[in-house]
Image (tube, grey):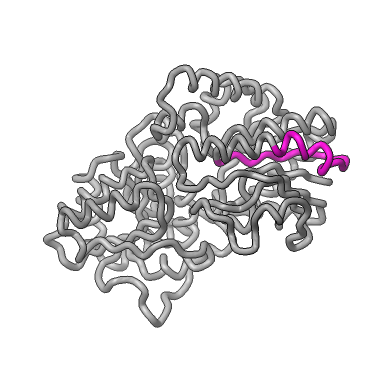
Amino acid sequence: MHILIVTHYFYPEQFRINDLALELKARGHQVTVLTGLPNYPKGEWMNGYGYGSIGDEDWQGVRIVRVPTLRRAAGKGWQLALNYASFVFSACVLAPFWCRDDYDVIFTYEPSPFTVGIPAAMLRYLRRAPMIFWVQDLWPESLAAAGAVRSPRVLRWVGHVVRWIYQRCDLVLVQSRAFIEPAVAAGARREDVRYFPNWAESSFLPVAAPKKRQVPAGFVVMFAGNMGEAQSLLTIVAAAARLRHVADIQWVMIGDGRRMAWMQEAVQDQGLQTCVHFLGRHPTSSMPSFFAQADALLVTLKADPVFAQTIPSKVQSYLACGKPILAALNGEGATVVKQSGGGIAVAAEDDAALADAVLQLYNMPSEQRTTMALSARRYFEETFQQEQLIDQLLQWMQNVHRG
């Protein structure tokens, strides 16, 4: 098949869609990617890219078509809105001329913004190709939950756009079973909705810890990923404050985000510098090495019904690396952690319960923690293996292609 992938983000930005494109190519399919100019997450052009990079690019046999986009800059609401809108505008104007092939399937990847579906829907009409839409983030619900949009009028308008996109999808894939009902309520046809979870990148495997330790000595609770409003960083700070008397427990934060500066200030104000450490952002490929140095991997979310419906993608990465998981979240993500037998899940924003869970793991015999880690990896292999999931995806693609 010739598969057109429409995505706001792509290599060298680090998203799972990169793995999917390469795997489809490796399986003998022709892959074209319509995307923008890479500037996530810092809002700066990545090395070697800029407005001179518009047009065609080849990446390991995958054709990339880059249209001009405005940078997300500091990531403020209006800057993100311009970044999102610029991709939609450029793709709608240029893609009809730059993506002129006959495509068998148009696959749209939506970790946010949902508006990536607008040029995809236009190309569906122009190229007469079925469209599959992979939903990672519910709109407008997540916009309201994260505080990104507060105006009821704007949220209603976004809802109309979402409905328009859903109604033009031949198949809607959702990363969490809890997304099914909201997607149907927002306009997707129930018979066209399928559960299709995330996998972990192929680099996420249990590995030996490096000889040169990169994290503080002690019992290490490690958080990796975006540090934004949704991650409820206050819960981590409060739990760390409760356990400050246990000098051996160390909290390690890897990544960055809009709320990182706030968290660093909160750690300073509460005198937690000796037990909460910020290691900055590191390449995805280096994360298994960091995880190998941790005793537990931490995931947190706000106590919001929208976030209770999602499975944070880091959960799959944590499971893949075979480490005990500490989860302070509700809903689907907590269910996965509990079902895996690979960790302890407590209620979102409950810092006291999180502190108790850390102590429980800290006081647990090492053999029991090892059993928990093995259960995590086993559950990943049974549920979130990339090869099996892509097998299923290709079957769906063949089905919609044949009509």
In-front residue for pair 30/144: 144
Instruction: Point out the stretch of residues depicted in magenta.
Output: 90-111
Q: Name the spot of residue 318 as percent of width and height, x first.
A: 44, 57
Task: Look at 21% across and 54% down and name the residue there.
Answer: 240
Q: Name the spot of residue 139 as percent of width and height, x first.
A: 52, 29
Task: Look at 72% across and 38% down and name the residue there.
Answer: 91
Report how many numbered discs are placed on residues in the image. Answer: 0
In-front residue for pair 105/382: 105
In the rendered image, the residue lying farthest to the front is 52
In-front residue for pair 275/90: 90
Instruction: Locate residue 393: give its quadrant.
Output: top right
In the rendered image, the residue lying farthest to the bottom is 211
Q: For this view, does 154 lie left or right of residue 146?
A: right
- The image shows residue 357, relative to residue 399, as above or below, that is below
In-front residue for pair 389/202: 202
Q: Name the spot of residue 77 as percent of width and height, x first.
A: 46, 36
- The image shows residue 81, relative to residue 337, as above or below, that is above
Residue 32 belongs to magenta span: no
Q: For this view, does 180 lie left or right of residue 192?
A: left
Query: In which quadrant is the C terminus drawn?
Result: top right
Task: Look at 50% across and 59% down and name the residue there.
Answer: 320
- The image shows residue 59, relative to residue 356, as above or below, that is below
Q: Name the spot of residue 27 as percent of width and height, x first.
A: 78, 56
Task: Look at 65% across and 21% down and name the residue there.
Answer: 164
Residue 105 belongs to magenta span: yes
